[in-house]
Image: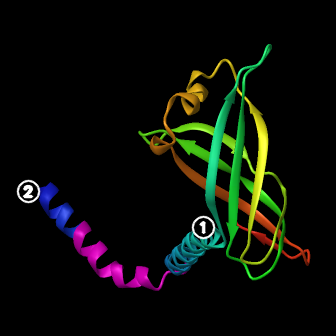
Amino acid sequence: MRGVTAALALAAAVWTAAPALADDPVTARLDALEKRVSHLEAVIAQQQTHATELLTLAHWSAQFKQGDLSNSYQISYTLQSHCDKPIKIIDGRIDFLGPNGKRVYSIPLIREAAIAPSGEASFSGHYYLNPSLPQEMRLRDLPPSQIATRLLVTRIVFHDNSVLPLE
């Protein structure tokens, strides 16, 4: 009985102190922090959406090359710009994903882009395989229809040297 009375007294004390907690500076600071975090999350989501609107991967192809000492892919891709300014440099990568959505292979974008406003530019390069990662051979083994791509852009530098960070 004494335990129940003590619990009721404690509950009554907490209940009457609850309005005072709303005026507590710590509670106010926590509320302000939660608002700032929510705002930052919204800005990050908008930037990620913005990046996919600025550049798209229009086309890609990969050809396996067997070498004497190492194997590689000859990968060509075309980027479509949806910007109103010419692009000079792009930092980012292309991920090639298998049917299960997992990364099969990944290549860095060729940085020196030179893409006209609302234009296209094609790029090509040799990308070597890591023999200790057998999943990298899946790009050779899977038909292109079963490979999805993901373009990840982290930074765009325009011809006028303005920089758009997208991380």
| Contact, mark 2 vs mark 1 (Cβ under 8 Å) | no
Q: Position of residue 48 (x, y in %)?
A: 60, 67
In this view, 146 is above or below 44: above
Label 2 secondary element: loop
What residue lies at 79% left-to-right and 61% top-to-bottom? 90
* Residue 78 visible here: yes
The label shown at residue 52 is 1
Residue range in magenta is 10-25
What residue lies at 41% left-to-right and 39% top-to-bottom? 100
Q: How is the image coloured?
A: rainbow
* Residue 167 visible here: no
| Relative horizontal placement of residue 15, taking residue 62 as reference (left or right) | left
Quadrant of res 86: bottom right
Give the mark nearest the N terminus, 2 or 1.
Answer: 2
Q: Amino acid at mark 1?
A: Thr
The label shown at residue 1 is 2
